[in-house]
Amino acid sequence: MVKKLFILISYGVIAALIYLYGEWLLEWIQQGGARFIFLTVIIATLLALFPIIPYPIIGGVLGAAYGPFLGSAVTWIGSSLASIIMFMFVRYGYQDWGLSLIRRSDLVTKVTAMFEKNAFMAIFITRLIPIIPSIIVNIYSALSRVSFINYSIASSLGKVPSMILFAVIGNSIATNPSQLLWIALFYSSFLLVVWIGYRAWQRVALQKQANI
């Protein structure tokens, strides 16, 4: 109980600090802080871990500051590390509570069991769709029995396209706004392909579940 309370208080204190100083940190990056790339990665991780400011905005700032390639890398590293840290917070602090809640519903128990059997692909595909809140994927994965390694790899790989998108858009706004239409068309097509693939994979997974 003491460990759970300590984790919760620590998270709340850091969240409050990000709320108070998040905008100032972004301004610092824009005004020359980008020269300190290691420190910028830490800031990007904290801003992703406590999403007071929407991460697409942060990715855009990083893309404008570093350019599309390095900006994408910093944006991706920050987001991936934040998701892994959140996973560890929940897994090692609250998984027992979460499992007890899951077991109260037969439907949720069955859905979770199916999710665990196909965890890598499920996490990877949901990461490819940026409209699915990252915090939901983080917490649900941590409360389940998905391994830390599978989660970390699938989550980080799945974040690559959207993190590149955020940084490229930020760089395009700063250098060539006319590219935004082509970027939007390309990524919309990409999401359509991902959605079709996800639906096909979902049908196959349900069919396998029904045959068990």
Image (cartoon, helix red, strand yellow):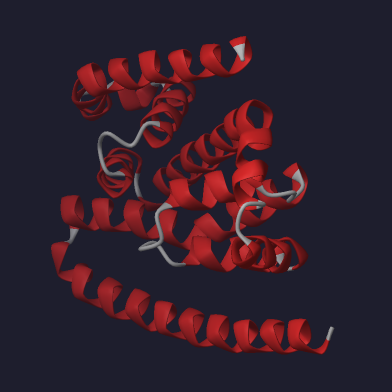
Left or right: residue 204 compared with residue 180:
right
- Which of the image's four quarters has the C terminus? bottom right
Q: Position of residue 139 (x, y in %)?
A: 54, 44
User: Which residue is at 27% across, 44% downward?
Assistant: 54
Left or right: residue 209 compared with residue 30:
right
Q: Is residue 169 above or below residue 38?
A: below
User: Which residue is at 27% across, 47% downward?
Assistant: 60
User: Which residue is at 66% across, 56% downward?
Assistant: 154
The answer to whether residue 83 is seen in the rendering is yes
User: Front-most of 188 and 86?
Assistant: 86
| Number of residue marks | 0
User: Front-most of 204 and 195?
Assistant: 204
User: Which residue is at 75% across, 87% downward?
Assistant: 210
User: Front-most of 102 and 34?
Assistant: 102
Q: Is residue 128 above or below residue 52?
A: below
- Which of the image's four quarters has the N terminus? top right
Q: Position of residue 90 (x, y in %)?
A: 59, 33
Left or right: residue 30 compared with residue 94:
left
Q: Is residue 74 above or below residue 13?
A: below
Q: Is residue 50 above or below residue 145?
A: above
Q: Splitting the image into 4 quarters, where does residue 198 fall?
A: bottom right
Q: Position of residue 33 (x, y in %)?
A: 30, 21
Q: Position of residue 128 (x, y in %)?
A: 49, 66
User: Front-most of 21 and 205?
Assistant: 205
The answer to whether residue 69 is seen in the rendering is no
